[in-house]
Image (tube, helix red, strand yellow):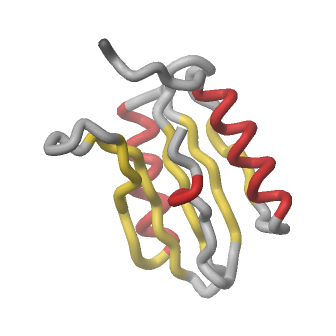
């Protein structure tokens, strides 16, 4: 039996709240499907660099984990995220700004 999952909009709301509690600015820049949309989290470190994370299935364990989709100059990361969004209109994109590189994804395994 498949593992029950939170609706995407519920997960996004909880994630944004957790970030706000630590004063990490975050914005939804693309609102995807409320129920089952995938999520990309882009972290800008405010020095021209960024990293984008996406959730993938680990086929060895059956668990979902966050992996790096793109990393490097922010304009290159933005281009990769835009390409993914063009391919999947149900995709959510959340952008964070944190000089320290905090994203809290390891705490958000729902």
* Residue 20 horizontal side relative to residue 57, left or right: right
Q: Quadrant of the C terminus?
A: top right
Residue found 40% across the figure and 45% down from its top: 55
- Residue occupying the far left of the picture: 60
Q: How many marks?
A: 0
Picture coordinates of residue 47, whole percent (x, y): 61, 87
- Residue occupying the far top of the picture: 1
Figure quadrant of residue 85? top left
* Residue 77 horizontal side relative to residue 6, left or right: left
Q: Looking at the picture, tell me which residue is in the foreground, 83 or 53.
A: 53
In the depicted structure, whether residue 62 falls above or below residue 74: above
Picture coordinates of residue 34, whole percent (x, y): 62, 20
Residue found 46% across the figure and 19% down from its top: 4
* Residue 108 horizontal side relative to residue 58, left or right: right
Q: Looking at the picture, tell me which residue is in the foreground, 27 or 9.
A: 9
Picture coordinates of residue 76, whole percent (x, y): 42, 68
Residue found 39% across the figure and 42% down from its top: 84
Q: Looking at the picture, tell me which residue is in the foreground, 11 or 90.
A: 11
Residue found 36% across the figure and 62% down from its top: 68
In the depicted structure, whether residue 60 falls above or below residue 74: above
Q: Quadrant of the N terminus?
A: top left
Q: Looking at the picture, tell me which residue is in the foreground, 76 or 4.
A: 4
């Amino acid at each position: 039996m498949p593992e029950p999952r939170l609706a995407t909009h519920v997960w996004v709301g909880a994630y944004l709240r957790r970030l706000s509690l630590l004063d990490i600015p975050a914005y939804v820049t693309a609102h995807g499907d409320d129920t089952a949309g995938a999520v990309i989290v882009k972290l800008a470190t405010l020095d021209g660099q960024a990293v984008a994370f996406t959730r993938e299935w680990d086929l060895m364990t059956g668990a979902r984990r966050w992996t790096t989709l793109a990393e490097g100059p922010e304009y290159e990361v933005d281009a990769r995220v835009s390409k993914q969004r063009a391919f999947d209109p149900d995709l959510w994109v959340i952008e964070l700004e944190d000089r320290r590189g905090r994203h809290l994804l390891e705490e958000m395994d729902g």
